Amino acid sequence: MLRFIAKRLTSGFLLLLVISTLTYFLLFFSSSSVARNLLGDSATSAQVVAKAHELGLDRPLLPRYFEWLGHALTGDLGISWYSNQPIVSSLASRLPVTMTIVLFAILLASTLATVLGMLAAVKGGWIDRLVQFLAIAGFAVPNFVVAIILVTVFAINIAVFPATGWVNLSDEPRGWFLSLVLPVAALVVSTVASAAQQIRSAFKDVLSRDWVRTLRSRGIRNNEILFKHVLRSAAPSGLTVLSLQFVGMLGGSVIIEKIFALPGIGQLAVDSTTQGDTPVVMGIVVYSVIVVILVNLVVDLVNGWLNPKVRV
Amino acid sequence: MNLSKRVAAAISIAALGLGAFSGVPAANAASQTTLTIGSIIEPKSWDPTQADLGHMAPLYQSVYDTLVTRTPAGTYAPNLATKWSFGPGSSWLQMDLRKGVKFTDGTTFDAKVAKANLDAFVAGNGPYSATLAGVTTDVVSDYTIKIKLLKANPDILYYLATTDSYMASPKSIGTAGLKTVPVGSGPYVYDKSSVPGSQLVFTANAKYWDKSKVKFKKIVFKLMTDVTARLNALLSGQIDATILDANTYATAKGRGMTDYLNNVDWQGIMILDRDGALSKPLSDVRVRQAIGYSLDRAALLKAVQKGFGTVTQQPFGKASGAQDSALENYYSLDNAKAKSLLAAAGYPDGLTLDMPAWPDPTMRAVLGDQLAASGIKVNWVSVPGPEYRNQLKAKKFAIAVYQLGLANATAWVTINFTAAPEASWNVFGSKDQVISQALGSINVNPSEKNVSAQAAKINAFLVKNAWFLPFYQMPQMFFTNSHVKTVNSIANAVPYIYNYAPTGK
């Protein structure tokens, strides 16, 4: 198992190196005039040239890249050109916001999707049709629409949850929980819809297998078959879908963070990419790739635990 | 506004309409002792040398004092400078400074500190450092400085009141720490509980020299880039004041919020290439005028701004003292005249102009149709948002739609944005005798009266020669709830921090 983990971590590191290198070079060729954007309309051309020099933008690409890489390998991701904040501390305060929302959303979504998917596969009939209808509706309604409706109803008209903002758990646990509810709910809706469909299909597939029929013919209780055998066999495909959903949510959280004015990593990613804040974009890419690598590693480990054949 | 934002605004407004029947009042979390503002931006740096106008102004004003302040009406009032006088031809400005002012780190403010700050500003390569280019400051006595100007600067007080004279503690000048933590002498103190990128917190400066300016115990700026988030936060009582837009105006107003409309910008066409370097047709004044005669400004205002604003044909605003009411109808919509001007210029079959695609599709559609009616076809060239300005500055386009904060700017600011050889939006460096003579006159006599008179000549020239074809002045739409009131600051997108006060409700 340790060998398996070491192998995955090594390939993950190489992946991180490749993606960060590609990103750095792509940003160089696509970046706008950062110096002009920083100084605005009124600055003279000479000022813009001086600002570009101050930021090191007039230096050749390769030395700049290797300097960034050297610092990054020591954990120093630099300072934002736009906020002057150290990127490591900026991401350290923002990543937990996004990760908390996404983790809660994925946990809730996986629980609901599993229950709905199982019910649809096992019971069939109107429950199956309802799940399929909800899946289509979930796909059709974007999460920002869900978010706006939730805010309007539960934050403005009924006023039980805050309309915007984030409260740290350490500052005020109740406020933290309340600030989580609407963003998580908005993310969960579409995720549940697609995941429930996948889990339903996986369940149906496993239920139609010969060995399930054999178990039934031996008189084993239906609940035992479902939860001990079928669920375990259907879990890997559900897990794969949920891991993809998790990664997708990291990107999809951008709109949710904007609507709820959450200081997460998604909004920072959009702003810094738009502005051409290369050090911040690079920091976000590094952190995001690490998160994705870790999520995939965890999914592989769980899959291996569920299905020993995967470990081979 | 892109499609998703429009959809978001529409859904928000529709849902609020439905919710109105619930009869449940919005949350009311406002407190008279705390002012919470929804801000669309936060400072890139707290170093005063990097100070900026507009949305940044109340943030800097919270922690820093300026030498002079600008009243809502646009006059100048003492602040750290108690009185001032100009030398002959405004070649220098002598200022007496306030005694007994201390920075929050305990350092005393005096003439040496003022000089250190002004010198740092000149050398700091910030957004507005060019406005003090060549300026030197002498310490005359412990509390008197003399600011020497290299050339006439009729707006020296304006710049000192807005961006150029935020005073930082001398211990912090030039340090890296000043970029992230301000150390000033202002009415509020930057609080360590601030989380850049989320919210900035300021507490009242207990030792501030003017208690009348400290009206709240705490001010919180919550960073909210999305207008729907700001609307929701305002309606639910999470914030007391914020800026909204034409799409959210009716909802906020309908929910009892107080509006403060302030014409700060105008939108219009900038014809940048008047010498035909990039587009030969535009070197002919008749082609430029044909564009002017093709515009239905009222229709643009209605379609793009939902009617909010005032149509105008002049790049100079009322506050400049250079406006001429006769110029407001210089180009009345006349497609036949536009066509005949094009024909006289050698384009009887019309022409095609490349313009960078303005982000608002409504603007593109309406403006494109209006120009097409005179035989001018617009080829909208896709340009990424952040690149729009850069491509204009890089002379990639001869003509473009743009928005300039000149609706109520001073005459000198407007000249330096539009007409001077080195003006921000004279990117091709166009020159004309009318402009150079007017600038020469201002250099010799920078009195307010003469600046306005010369600016009027430039304004008339710009309109008649169609260097700029404004459509309308458009208001910034600021809102407060019932707990807070404010006053608009002339030519600034949002109110100055000094102008907020609790209503007592």
Image (cartoon, coloured by chain):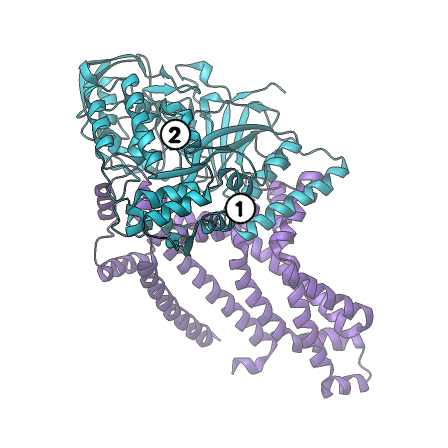
Chain coloured cyan here: B
Disc 2 marks a residue whose amino acid type is Tyr
From the top left corner, tell me how far across and down residue A241 is, in percent.
59, 70
Side of B293 relative to B257 (left or right):
left
Where is B38 relative to A146, above or below? Answer: above
Residue B262: x %, y % from top left: 49, 28
Q: Which residue is mark 2?
A: B60
- The one nearer the camera, A104 or A282, is A282
User: Can you tell which chain is drawn purple?
Assistant: A
Assess whether mark 2 and mark 1 are in contact (beta carbons under 8 angstroms): no
Q: How far, Cα to Cα, is label 1 from label 2?
A: 24 Å
Q: Which amino acid, by three-letter code, is at mark 1? A: Leu
> In this orientation, which residue lies closer to the viewer: B212 or A223?
B212
Residue in the picture at 57% in, 28% down: B259
Q: Which residue does the numbered mark 1 point to in the structure image?
A: A262
What chain is tagged by disc 1? A
Query: A208 above or below A68?
Result: below
